[in-house]
Every structure is written in structure tokens, then in C-alpha cells.
Image (spheres, rainbow, N blue to C red):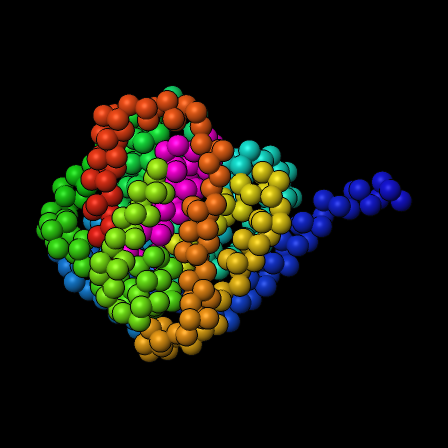
Amino acid sequence: MTRRSHSATPHVPLVLSGLSLTAFAALCVQQHLPMADALVYRAEGEAVLRGGDDLYGFTVTEWRLPATYPPFAALLFVPAGLLPVTALKATFLAGNALLLAVLVRLSARLARLTPRLPALCAATALALWLEPVFQTLLFGQVNLALACLLLWDLNRPSGARWKGAAVGVAAGIKLTPVIFIAYLVLRGRHREAGAATAAFAGTVGLGALALPSASLDFWTRRLYETERVGKAWIVDNQSLHGTVARVLGEPVPGVAWLLPAVLTAITGLWLAARAAEERHAVLLTAFTALLVSPISWSHHWVWCVPLIAVLVGEGRTRLAYAVAALFTARTMWLLPHEGDLDLHLPWWQQPLASPYPLLAFALLAAYPSARISSASTIRYAYPCSARKRWRWAAKSWSSVSRATTE
């Protein structure tokens, strides 16, 4: 009897995985898989095939979505431009499902967990229902790919060949990961920061060589047009910018958002630079980026997956359940948000409209000072060196604070 129950136990996660995937597939069919972002990527690939001159001039889908990524990203989307829409959606759905499994595995490695295959399958199936992950698959977004690229590179052994280069490539695709170059500098990992900077410069150069007109247009004009991405005040935007806009009822909060964003960036990077544990430093950097970016759509917050894994790895299971519940609850979508109602929410609905930034601020505020390493304290005992690091980080992030992100 005992032997039979033990042998049946490993099948429980597999059954759970099957049920979760079946329910997810049924919901995808019911939603007709709009995959609006994947259609934008397809249009970018088609624009490149036509020469790229109109890369930032078109809009697609009923929401009239434009291209907002750097020219280098458009080059990577050329294969998407060759696929029929149905094949494109199937490819993105299967690819993102696979990438989620990879992200779960990389998150487990970050948390120093060694789960068996059934547990990984179950975790992947359950992670599908986290709102950022679900929305990423539904829209056909690249968030999972970027998170995997960053976590894989940052988790590689010290001294690995070209460690840091993948960070630069990720930044070349979507700019916001540039903050991880600042993170590498502030952690004293200058070789990796150099590799990341060189790779990022390479993506810019490759884009300029292949698409000179589009590159000039992007880096001199489109980069600064945040409004191209969408309305920053809607509940979809879970950044500090969106939160401040909704609280004030002001579509363009200006300095009321910019000053707190600068302070948040400085505080988050300071904590990341001095964190005793590398996994904490990575998460602090990721959530700082999500907070201070002008637009962080809810599906950008796929970093909830490594956060939950780290909490589980540290034995804080109840907190991990609470975080998972918050990212599954979808409270922002339960509020009235048609038209400009997002700007007229009563005070008691504001926390429900901005659950992700509130959680990120709670993490920054609650990060215990006992975890700050003595090694970091010694490193920062030299004012000149510290000033150089912070000056470099501030310069690196200044462009990202103006960047447009889908």
C-alpha cells in the first residue's frame, strides 16, 4: 500500500500540468488568440524586407499599434514577416510556452533549487496563470525571451567567455535591460559590463548598417515619443508613472512622476549594488527597472516568476503564495477602465489599480539591511570610486527613462 502511494505521487504534478495546459488551451481558443504584439513584430519584419524606410511609419491591428523597438529588433523579426498569421500565432504560442519552462528552470537555478522534472512541469503549468505570463502568451510578446536571456547570462559562472554579452543583446532589443549594465558596473563586474556594452553597441551598429534611415529616425526622434506606445495613465501601465498619473488624475504628471522615479532608480540600484546575495541584486534591479520605466505594461512583470522561486528557495513559502496570489488576482482588470475612468478612481480603488508597483515598492522598502554585504561596504568606502560608478549608472539610465517600450 505504501509502495503504491509513493509510486503514484510523481504522477500528481503531471496530472496537474495536463489539466492546467488543457484549460489554458481552451481559453486561448475562446479568446481567438489576438496576439496583437506578434502582429506588430510581423509587420516590422515585412517592413525590413521592403527596405525599412517605413519601419516607424505604419500601424497595425484595430488598436493601431506602431513599431517601438530599436531597428536591431526589427532585423530579428524578419522570419516573422515570412510566416502566415496562423503559423505565426502557433509559433509564438509554442515558443513562449517553451520559454516559460526555461524561465522556471533558470529561476530555480537563481534560487538554488534543484527540482525534479515533474515539479518543473507543474510549476510551469501553474505559472501560465500568473497574469503577466498569461498576457505575454495572449499578446505574443517577447518578455519571456528577454527574461531568459538576462537570467541565463547573469547566472553563468564567473569568467565564462563573453559573459555579459547577452545582457547587451537584450538591451539592443528592448532598451530597458540597459539598467543591468549599470548593475554590473555597480557590482564591480567591469569585465561583464564591458562585454554587455560592446554587445549593445554592436546591436546599434548592426541596425544602423542594415537600416540607416530607420536608425536615424529611431535614435533621433522615435525614442523620445513615449505617447506612441499608448496612454501612460491606463491601468495596463503598472509603472510608477502610471500609478502617479492615476492617483493625481493627471494624464501627464510631469515632475510629480519624474522626481520620484529618479529617487527610486537611485535607491533600487544602491540596494542592488550592496546586496549580499546575487539573486537579490538581480531581482532588485529588475523591479527597479519596471518601476522607473515610463511604461511597464502588466505583461512586462514576468519577473514575478524568479521572485516566487527565490522566496520558495529561502523557505518563505507563505510569502511566495501571497505574491503568486497577487500576480494571479488581476485586480486592475476588475476596476472600471473604459474611456478615461482610470483617471477617476476613488482612493480605495487605487491599490487595486496598481498592485505590481506597490509590491515592488514594498520589496525595496522591506529589504533588510542585514543582507547588505560587508564586501560591498568596503568597496564603497572610497568616495571617488563610488561617485564614478553612480555617475556612470545615472548616465546609462538617463536614456532608458525616456525610452518607449511595448
In the picture, measured across the screen, residue 277 lies left or right of residue 203, that is right
Q: Residue at x 25, y 64 (%)?
A: 253
Q: Which of these two is toward me, 225 or 69?
A: 225
**Quarter of the image holding residue 193?**
top left
Q: Dominant secondary structure of the magenta stretch? A: helix
Q: Position of residue 295 (x, y in %)?
A: 31, 58
Q: Is residue 301 visible?
A: yes
Q: Is residue 50 visible?
A: no
Q: Residue at x 41, y 42 (%)?
A: 284
In the picture, measured across the screen, residue 21 lies left or right of residue 353, that is right
In the depicted structure, whether residue 84 falls above or below residue 176: below
295 falls in the magenta region: yes
Q: Residue at x 35, y 62 (%)?
A: 243
Read off the magenta span.
Answer: 271-297
109 falls in the magenta region: no
Q: Quadrant of the N terminus?
A: top right
Q: How many marks?
A: 0
In the depicted structure, whether residue 218 falls above or below residue 190: below
**Quarter of the image holding residue 189?**
top left
Q: Residue at x 18, y 53 (%)?
A: 223
Q: Position of residue 321 (x, y in %)?
A: 60, 52
In the picture, measured across the screen, residue 397 lies left or right of residue 94, that is left
Q: Which of these two is toward me, 181 or 70?
A: 181
